[in-house]
């Protein structure tokens, strides 16, 4: 179907179901991104149960196996682009995001496809995207060229809004919250605990580690691992606990082993080694007593479960989330400042009974903000159906002259 041709009518005389594409960092590379995809698919299905949902994936086989709500999955990396562009052109709406995809070296890749959809007359919607850092000139130009033509732009945090404004986006940007806040938990059973070699009836502390990044940019990797090993050993002693490292993507495993190898009590540490869905990792939080970590969605899952949370910020999105839930957010923690970090862990544990109600209230508010993204996407879908209803009337003979689909060709800037 080309933009100058009418859509084929269903046998009932009604327009065919909407075709909605989703474009993000999907394909099983990161549990947080998969949680986002699950939540966005659920939102779209709730608005349009009969729509055909098309996911553009970095690993189509993984998405087909793990996302049953996806009706169609298209590989878009390292494949011939003509079929990808043809699929883009067949859509009624392309949803970008959610999650952190507008950053250096990656923004241009995603926005190239968004622009390709726009020039084919496809409506586009930014679904609680994260932005930054955006210092590269090519990525900044891609943002300035593509985002102003989107139907609506929703960002997941204040940091992302500030980044896009600094790049030069002057239109309204709505700040909501991460889509994964609406993820439903799945059971993580006692048998699953035993399968991981985890004891029952003892305190369990969750940790999430990744490459040092900006959270510890002055540290070499060995010092960084030693710092987190000090924290893990402290938790073992202070709480008489076992420490469980939760990899949120495959590269986290190496860093978890690096920390575990430097613990003085490595027998009290375990790394989750089986593959789990995002909902199961969220369900696993019900077995924990406290968490310390870097990965944003690990922290989101813990806060959803009402746990004491100590973020170790490595980027603006983690700082922003810590602020929004009222959690401590340490800045510039270095190896020689380990005592300050341990003191913060100690205080978090002691004061959490008084903080629990505040955390639960903040999470409730964030979940409401997350739902706002889905509502705004629904407004775009309603407008699309209204437009298609008008076009059906046109092709039924109620409009006697002119090109009724001229509006579709110009809809990218609506």
Image (tube, rainbow, N blue to C red):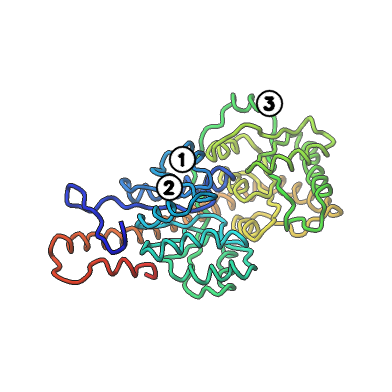
Q: Does 244 appear above or below 80?
A: above
* Pointer 1 with pointer 2, Cβ within 8 A: yes
Q: Which of marks 1 and 2 is nearer the N terminus?
A: 2
Per the image, the residue denoted by label 1 is: 67
| Residue at x-position 65% and y-position 54% | 327
297 vs 133, nearest the viewer = 133
For numbered disc 2, what is the local secondary structure?
helix
Q: Does 158 appear above or below 280?
A: below
Q: Where is residue 354 in the image (x, y as percent from the top left)?
A: 64, 49
271 vs 23, nearest the viewer = 23
Q: Distance between the residues labelled 1 and 2?
A: 9 Å
Q: Which of marks 1 and 3 is nearer the N terminus?
A: 1
For numbered disc 3, what is the local secondary structure?
loop
Q: Which residue lies furthest to the right in this view?
A: 336
Per the image, the residue denoted by label 2 is: 41
Q: Where is residue 298 in the image (x, y as percent from the top left)?
A: 62, 45
Per the image, the residue denoted by label 3 is: 197
Q: Tell whether 208 sits left or right of 232.
A: left
For numbered disc 1, what is the local secondary structure?
loop
Pointer 3 local density, CA inside 10 Å: few below 14, some 14–19, many at least 20: few
Q: How far apart are marks 1 and 3 (CA)?
A: 29 Å
The quarter of the rendered structure image containing the N terminus is bottom left
Dividing the picture into quarters, in which one does residue 218 lie? bottom right
Q: Earlier in the sequence, mark 2 or mark 3?
A: 2
372 vs 169, nearest the viewer = 169
Q: Where is residue 405 in the image (x, y as percent from the top left)?
A: 26, 66
Pointer 1 local density, CA inside 10 Å: few below 14, some 14–19, many at least 20: some
Q: Position of residue 202 (x, y in %)?
A: 69, 29
342 vs 248, nearest the viewer = 248
Q: Tell whether 364 sits left or right of 239.
A: left
């Amino acid at each position: 179907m080309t933009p100058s041709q009418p859509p084929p009518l269903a046998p009932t005389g009604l327009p065919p179901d909407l075709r909605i594409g989703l474009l993000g960092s999907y394909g099983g590379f990161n549990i947080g991104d998969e949680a986002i995809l699950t939540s966005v698919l659920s939102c779209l299905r709730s608005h349009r149960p009969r729509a055909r949902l098309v996911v553009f994936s970095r690993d189509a086989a993984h998405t087909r196996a793990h996302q049953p709500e996806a009706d169609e999955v298209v590989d878009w990396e390292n494949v011939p682009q003509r079929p990808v562009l043809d699929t883009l052109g067949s859509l009624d709406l392309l949803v970008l995001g959610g999650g952190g995809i507008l950053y250096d070296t990656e923004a241009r890749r995603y926005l190239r496809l968004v622009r390709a959809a726009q020039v084919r007359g496809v409506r586009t919607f930014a679904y609680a995207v994260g932005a930054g850092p955006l210092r590269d000139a090519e990525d900044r130009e891609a943002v300035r060229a593509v985002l102003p033509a989107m139907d609506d732009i929703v960002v997941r945090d204040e940091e992302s809004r500030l980044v896009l404004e600094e790049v030069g986006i002057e239109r309204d940007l709505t700040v909501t919250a991460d889509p994964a806040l609406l993820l439903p938990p799945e059971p993580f059973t006692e048998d699953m605990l035993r399968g991981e070699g985890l004891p029952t009836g003892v305190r369990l502390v969750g940790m999430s580690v990744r490459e040092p990044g900006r959270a510890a940019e002055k540290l070499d990797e060995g010092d960084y691992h030693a710092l987190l090993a000090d924290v893990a050993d402290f938790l073992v002693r202070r709480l008489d606990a076992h420490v469980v490292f939760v990899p949120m993507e495959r590269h986290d495993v190496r860093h978890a082993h690096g920390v575990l190898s430097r613990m003085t009590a490595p027998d009290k540490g375990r790394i989750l080694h089986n593959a789990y869905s995002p909902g199961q990792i969220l369900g696993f939080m019900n077995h924990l007593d406290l968490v310390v970590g870097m990965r944003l969605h690990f922290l989101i899952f813990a806060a959803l479960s009402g746990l004491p949370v100590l973020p170790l910020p490595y980027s603006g999105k983690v700082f922003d989330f810590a602020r929004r839930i009222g959690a401590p957010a340490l800045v510039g923690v270095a190896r020689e400042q380990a005592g300050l970090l341990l003191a913060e862990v100690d205080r978090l544990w002691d004061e959490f009974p008084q903080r629990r109600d505040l955390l639960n209230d903040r999470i409730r508010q964030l979940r409401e903000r997350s739902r706002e993204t889905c509502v705004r996407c629904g407004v775009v879908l309603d407008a699309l159906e209204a437009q298609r209803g008008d076009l059906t009337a046109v092709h039924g003979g109620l409009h006697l002259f002119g090109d009724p689909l001229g509006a579709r060709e110009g809809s990218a800037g609506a």
